Image (cartoon, grey):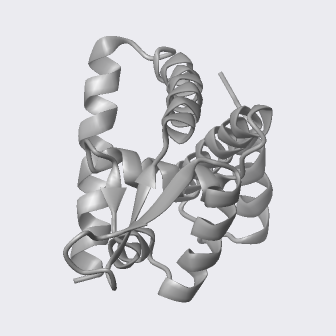
Amino acid sequence: MKDSVDDHVDLWANELPDLDRRVEGIAVRLQVLAKYLDRHRDAVLAEYGLQWWEFKTLHMLRRGGTPYRATPGELAKQLGMSAAALTNRLDALEKRGYVERTHDRDDRRKVGATLTPAGHKLWEQGIDQIQHVEQTLIHELSSSDQIRLEALLRRLVQATEKDSE
C-alpha cells in the first residue's frame, strides 16, 4: 500500500537518478511523523492556552521530582538556552501562576523556580492528552513491530549521539 511519501520519492527519483529511494523514504517518513506529533501536541497545548516553550519549562520542573523545583541555571542548561532568555520565560509563567520563584533560606542570592499546584495540574492535563496522541499512533503497530521499531530507532539515535561527541 502506497502513501504520500512514495509519491514524493517517485518525483525526486525522476530528478535525481542516484537518489537512494529507501533512505529518502525513511528520512521523509520520520519528518512526516515528527510534524504529525508536533501538530497534535501544539493543538493539545492550545486548548490550555500554552505554547510549546511554556509546557517544556513546566515539563523540566516536573521531571525533577518533588518538590518540582530547580534553579534558573539548571533549567537553562536543561532547555539549552541562556539564563537571560530563561528569566523571561519564568517571568511569563510566574505571572500566569504556574511557577513561583523563591529565595534560598540559607543564601538569599540563590533563587529557585518551583512548579505551583496550578502549573502541576496544567502539566498533568497536557501530558495525559499528548501521551494519548502518541499511544494512538504507535498502537497502529503490533506489539512485536513496536519492539522492533523502538530497537531500530534506538540504533539511529545512538549513531547521532556518537556523531555529536
Quarter the N terminus occupies: top right
Image position, residue 117 (x, y; %): 49, 35
Q: Does the image show residue 22?
A: no
Q: Residue at x 41, y 65 (%)?
A: 102
Vertically, is 159 above or below 28?
A: below
Q: Residue at x 47, y 23 (%)?
A: 138
Vertically, is 45 above or below 26?
A: above
User: Is 85 in front, or is 70?
Assistant: 70
User: Is 147 in front, or is 61?
Assistant: 61
Image position, residue 139 (x, y; %): 46, 15
56 left or right, relative to 164:
right
Q: Residue at x 27, y 16 (%)?
A: 144
The image quarter in which residue 93 lies: bottom right
User: Is 35 in front, or is 100?
Assistant: 100
The image quarter in which residue 29 lies: top right
Image position, residue 129 (x, y; %): 59, 24
Quarter the C terminus occupies: bottom left
Q: Residue at x 54, y 76 (%)?
A: 86
The image quarter in which residue 137 lies: top right
| Figure label count | 0
Q: Does the image show residue 72?
A: yes
Image position, residue 30 (x, y; %): 55, 48
119 left or right, relative to 72:
right
User: Is 97 in front, or is 72?
Assistant: 97
